[in-house]
Image: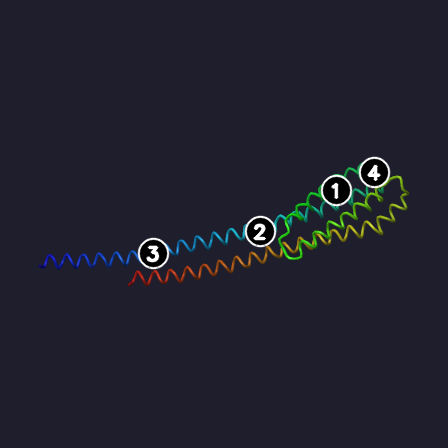
Amino acid sequence: FLIKKRVKRMSSLRQKLSLGLGGLLAVILVISILSILQLTRLGESIDVILRENYRSVIACQDMKEALERMDSGILFSLLGYSEKGDALIHKNDQAFDGALRVELNNITLPGEGEKATHLQELFKKYRSVLRDVADSKKSIATRKTAYFTELLPLFEEIKGTADEILKMNQQNMSEANDRARQRATSAKERMYILLFVGTIVAIG
């Protein structure tokens, strides 16, 4: 009888231990799975945002640099170094066009598409005026007048528009970083709550 009683007690204890440890294991598994899912989502969302915005930032920087070199090319041309100026203009015209295509195919923010389209239109005008200013058959006085009255204002407007798009994307990257920090803090809080629950289960 005593042996049977002890066996029952051992069996009961074994069941209690199994339930307690099983519950604790379940809580640990839930914490682990939720943490992994949260961190995976967070990492993926940050990666997408940063990759897209970074691509636009680099494209705008490339456009600004190419535009400045094209401006240097036209100044070489006006100073009488037409061959060197034309080579510089041609090379950076292609570089600007390539960077502009990257930006046009990477619209991710409200209002960015309109600015990118406006940039494309401005560059078409710039190219048209640039041909006249770079034309060595025309008088130097005519070319200089066209440069200061038409080409230079377009240069400044294009550069300003590219800078606006760049800043939009930089701002979004900064805001994404802030959101990521908030989500990380929220994930920590949930983990602490689950750990507390797990501790209570373990004590029980």
Return the mark for residue 50: 2
Q: Report the amino acid beneath label 3.
A: Ala
Query: Residue at left 64%, top 51%?
Result: 107
The residues tagged by marks 4 and 2 sit, at their Cα atoms, a distance apart of: 42 Å
Indicate the position of residue 14 as horizontal and vertical percent values: 21, 56
| Mark earlier in primary sequence (3, 2) | 3
Q: Which residue is mark 1?
A: 93
Q: Report the amino acid beneath label 1.
A: Asp
Q: Nearer the viewer, mark 3 or mark 1?
A: 3
Could you say whether the residue bearing mark 2 is in a helix, strand or loop?
A: helix
The residues tagged by marks 4 and 3 sit, at their Cα atoms, a distance apart of: 77 Å
Crowd around label 3: few <14 · some 14–19 · many ≥20 (10 Å): few
Q: Report the amino acid beneath label 2.
A: Leu
Q: Nearer the viewer, mark 4 or mark 2?
A: 2
71 relative to 114 in the view: left or right: right
**Mark 4 touches mark 2? (CB < 8 Å):** no
Indicate the position of residue 33 as horizontal and vertical percent values: 40, 53
| Mark earlier in primary sequence (3, 1) | 3
Could you say whether the residue bearing mark 1 is in a helix, strand or loop?
A: helix
Query: Residue at left 58%, top 49%?
Result: 51
Return the mark for residue 82: 4
Q: Nearer the viewer, mark 3 or mark 2?
A: 3
Q: Which residue is mark 3?
A: 26
Looking at the figure, which quarter contains the C terminus?
bottom left
Looking at the figure, which quarter contains the N terminus?
bottom left
The residues tagged by marks 2 and 1 sit, at their Cα atoms, a distance apart of: 28 Å
| Mark earlier in primary sequence (2, 1) | 2
165 relative to 74 in the view: left or right: left
Q: Report the amino acid beneath label 4.
A: Ser
Query: Residue at left 27%, top 58%?
Result: 19
| Mark earlier in primary sequence (4, 3) | 3
Compared to residue 2, the image places residue 122 above or below, namely above
